[in-house]
């Protein structure tokens, strides 16, 4: 089991744990306050618990990604976590406004006591403040970790600059898949639990998308790691520009399922603001819009990196990331870093352009 070894790895883990502990305690209090003040059996009573439960899941998922990034010494994922923390900050501000709107709607329907919002408001204000401080601290520590992890890469990576860039592309792609999971799941959960009066077909399609999305992300990650063209065919169709069928030929990659997912989220984003449907989405339209926009951006970045990763198949990267045997405890700490296979005697430090 991995344990941090240096001051900065402990600091990154410590800041995240303290931030999560404080915010989870505040969220739990707000959750309990609203639950204890709810009355009646209206459908609107699910709105606030869903917001809070999703946010709690966000902090737990961030803790898992932090541990994973430190264990893998993945600089890209560390930087991504700083961005993810900033996204949590934005969502915290939106959450407060959404909860207040939901509380007003519940009061109007006499489904909640009047003291729920005044008791919870100070804690909802404190949460973005805590996350703001945490984001600054994480960014400072991430800068230090970049130097620290660069030394690990210096010891274990090949000196081939082109190989470094291929490995960097692979790391970015795997990191994007991890954040895609949370964005997809967050959007779908809000839609399924809160949005009502949608057609049965649309509802069941959304439910069915959850296992499909998880399967796509798993297949994409495993196939890329193993350079499996057959597996990547589940998400990518390879059309050569010329008749040359070699793996190194230039090709156009049309990503079917990624583009289907992209079309779906664009469709949902437009549907939320159509006059005939916007009332169905009003309770969660702000948060769903944020999740939809973030997910669309992530899908576009994932498509771009998937194309680059697939273009790198057969160019010598696979031995660095697949099938490596771990012989010692020290190697276990670096098992996902690209090892020096002896292709060049003088390694050079990796930089992120």
Image (cartoon, rainbow, N blue to C red):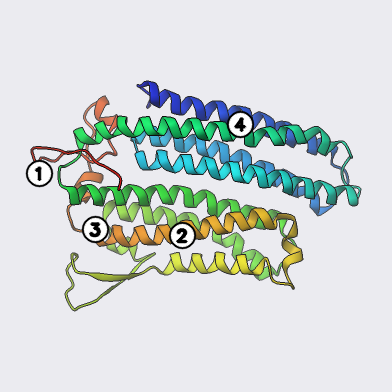
Tell me the element at label 3.
Answer: loop
Q: Earlier in the sequence, mark 2 or mark 3?
A: 2
> Quadrant of the rendered structure where residue 244 is?
bottom left
Q: Residue at x 40, y 33 (%)?
A: 142
Real-space CA distance between mark 1 and mark 2, rounded to the nearest whole angstrom: 35 Å
| Earlier residue among tags 1 and 2 | 2
> Residue 100: percent from the left, percent from the top?
78, 45
220 over 116 or under it: above or below? below
In the image, what residue occupies the spot 32% across and 56% down? 223
Which residue appears at 47% of the width and 32% of the height?
138
In screen coordinates, is 190 left or right of 117?
Answer: left
Q: Is residue 106 visible?
A: yes
The residue carrying mark 3 is: 312
Q: Nearer the viewer, residue 300 or 41?
A: 300
Q: How many other residues sit within 10 Å of disc 3, few (<14), some (14-19) or many (≥20)? A: many
Q: What's the distance in space between the residues labelled 3 and 1, CA to CA?
A: 18 Å
| Of the pair 224 and 7, the residue shown nearer to us | 7
Quadrant in which the N terminus is drawn: top left
Circle 4 sits on which residue?
Answer: 130
User: Alpha carbon of mark 1 to alpha carbon of mark 4: how far?
Assistant: 47 Å
The residue indicated by pointer 2 is: 299
In the rendered image, residue 7, in percent from the top left (x then y), is placed at: 38, 21
Residue on which the image places disc 1:
343
Q: CA distance from mark 4 to mark 3?
A: 42 Å
Q: Residue 283 bears which disc, if any?
A: none
């Amino acid at each position: 089991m991995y344990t941090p070894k240096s001051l900065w790895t402990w600091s990154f883990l410590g800041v995240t744990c303290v931030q999560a502990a404080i915010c989870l305690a505040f969220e739990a209090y707000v959750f309990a306050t609203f639950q204890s003040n709810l009355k009646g059996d209206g459908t609107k009573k699910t709105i606030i618990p869903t917001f809070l439960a999703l946010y709690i899941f966000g902090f737990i998922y961030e803790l898992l990604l932090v541990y994973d990034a430190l264990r893998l010494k993945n600089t890209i994922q560390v930087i991504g976590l700083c961005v993810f923390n900033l996204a949590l900050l934005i969502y915290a501000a939106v959450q407060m406004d959404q909860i207040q709107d939901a509380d007003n709607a519940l009061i109007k329907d006499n489904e909640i006591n009047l003291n729920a919002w005044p008791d919870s408001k100070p804690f909802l204000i404190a949460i973005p403040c805590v996350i703001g401080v945490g984001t600054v601290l994480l960014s400072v520590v991430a800068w230090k970790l970049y130097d620290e992890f660069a030394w690990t890469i210096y010891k274990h990576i090949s000196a081939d600059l082109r190989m470094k860039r291929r490995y960097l592309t692979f790391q970015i792609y795997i990191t994007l898949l991890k954040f895609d999971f949370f964005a997809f799941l967050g959007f779908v959960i809000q839609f399924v639990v809160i949005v009502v009066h949608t057609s049965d077909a649309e509802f069941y399609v959304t439910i069915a998308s959850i296992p499909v999305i998880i399967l796509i992300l798993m297949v994409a990650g495993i196939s890329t790691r193993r350079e499996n063209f057959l597996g990547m065919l589940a998400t990518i169709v390879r059309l050569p520009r010329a008749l040359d069928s070699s793996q190194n030929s230039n090709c156009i990659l049309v990503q079917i399922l990624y583009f289907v997912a992209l079309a779906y989220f664009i469709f949902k984003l437009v549907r939320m603001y159509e006059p005939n449907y916007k009332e169905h989405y009003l309770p969660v339209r702000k948060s769903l819009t944020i999740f939809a926009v973030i997910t669309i951006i992530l899908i576009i970045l994932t498509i771009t990196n998937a194309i680059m990763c697939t273009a790198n198949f057969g160019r010598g990267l696979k031995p660095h990331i697949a099938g490596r045997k771990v012989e010692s405890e020290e190697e276990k700490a670096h098992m996902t870093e690209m090892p020096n296979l002896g292709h060049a005697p003088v390694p050079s430090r990796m930089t992120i352009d």
